[in-house]
Amino acid sequence: MSDTLPALQRIRADVRAMHAYSVQDARGFIKLDAMENPFGLPPALQAELGARLGALALNRYPGDRGADLQRALAAHAQMPEGFRLMLGNGSDELISLLAIACDQPGATVLAPVPGFVMYAMSAKLQGLRFVGVPLTADFELDKAAMLAAIAHEKPAIVYLAYPNNPTANLWDDAVVEKIVEAQGVQGGLVVIDEAYQPFAARSYIDRLARHPHVLLMRTLSKFGLAGIRLGYLMGPAALVAEIDKVRPPYNISVLNCECALFALEHAEVFEAQARQIREERERLVTGLGRLPGVKTWPSDANMVLLRVPDAAKTFEGMKAQGVLVKNVSKMHELLANCLRLTVGTADENARMLAALEASL
Ligand SMILES: Cc1ncc(COP(=O)(O)O)c(C=O)c1O
């Protein structure tokens, strides 16, 4: 019946033909599919935050607290002098805003693939062309292919997730610099996406001030606050000021904003959690290394990519045992028979490993 609704014809044909971003139903599962921090807030902090949120003026539009949060995030990230920071409702919103801001005839977005799906999706939704440049078989940047694609396509934006999702690795810094230089020469932007920075050995922040065409994006999602939706973009003030013009007014609710400020005041709690997750990651990788037929790749994030003999069978087997991970094997041909595990608590990881072993 709904297929015959005439009003449906008013929805863009490409939108009707596409699949929505899929979120798996995780109720009742050990949820290790979306790179969330497995730890909650300690009870004393929960009570303190609750009282603070309860006292907010929910009858008012968000006001000056946004500026306080920008200052706190700039200090937290050690943003260089003369740079500017803008806030998004998650990095996802910032990626969409970048597509809007760069939507000129013929504009192209380029990123290595497999990579974070929203780079392609937001470009396509905005009517921009997306060019994915395959990684090598070992999930490294293909320097020659990236440089050739930049020269040929002259993209408005090159995204480099550092570390990458779903492969979890950091890129060779010399290759990153070559890509950044090439993109600068042809007059395009580079967005370094550091969503997984809390778990990574290196950051681009020290190199940011060298290049007037590079933006650095981060999020509080992997820091431990996926539920509040708070991403931020840092870059040369003149550039960020232009992108900020396409941001909807009041895009960060007073609740998001206050939660983020509260979390930054207690950053040491989240830093300790990140440290624990990094330690758990090493234990998990060691455990995975003992399983016959399982190949893993080095991780600088709170996820581990692995290849198993039959990803569909292993995914379903783990699910039947109450453990939800992500089967990424259909995302890209380089990911054949790959699963992506999120690093959880010690107990969750032990149960995940047992379920995996039993489902190979
Ligand atoms: C590389 C990368 N960037 C950005 C995001 C989105 O982050 P946010 O929760 O801030 O929208 C993700 C989410 O998984 C990601 O993997």
Image (tube, rainbow, N blue to C red):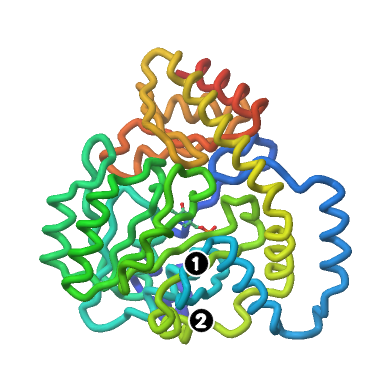
Q: Which residue is labeled 2 in the image?
A: 247
Q: Residues within 10 Å of mark 2 (few under 14, many from 20)?
A: many
Q: Upstream in the sequence, badge 1 or badge 2?
A: 1
Side of 56 where 22 appears, left or right: left
- Give me the residue at 36% from left, 65% from top: 191
Q: Position of residue 258 (x, y in %)?
A: 73, 68
Whether pointer 1 and pointer 2 mark residues with C-beta atoms closer than 8 Å, the reply is no
Q: Position of residue 98 (x, y in %)?
A: 40, 74
Q: Position of residue 335 (x, y in %)?
A: 32, 37
Snapshot quadrant of residue 259: bottom right
Q: Residues within 10 Å of mark 1 (few under 14, many from 20)?
A: many
Q: Position of residue 235 (x, y in %)?
A: 42, 72
Q: Which residue is labeled 1 in the image?
A: 79
- Give me the residue at 23% from left, 83% from top: 105
Snapshot quadrant of residue 153: bottom left
Q: Looking at the picture, does residue 342 appear above or below residue 68? A: above
What's the residue type where badge 2 is placed? Arg
Label count reads 2
Q: Nearer the viewer, mark 1 or mark 2?
A: 1
Instruction: Give 43 or 153, whichever is nearer the viewer.
Output: 43
Dividing the image into 4 quarters, which one contains the C terminus?
A: top left
The numbered dot on residue 233 is none
Q: Looking at the picture, does residue 251 appear above or below residue 52? A: below
What's the residue type where badge 1 is placed? Met
What is the secondary structure assignment of the residue under circle 2? loop
- Give me the residue at 54% from left, 48% from top: 198
Report how far apart the C-alphas of labels 1 and 2 lie in the structure: 21 Å
Q: Looking at the picture, does residue 279 appear above or below residue 40? A: above
- Give me the residue at 38% from left, 24% from top: 308
What is the secondary structure assignment of the residue under circle 1? loop
**Badge 1 residue CB within 8 Å of ligand 1:** no
Instruction: Give 102 or 338, whichever is nearer the viewer.
Output: 102
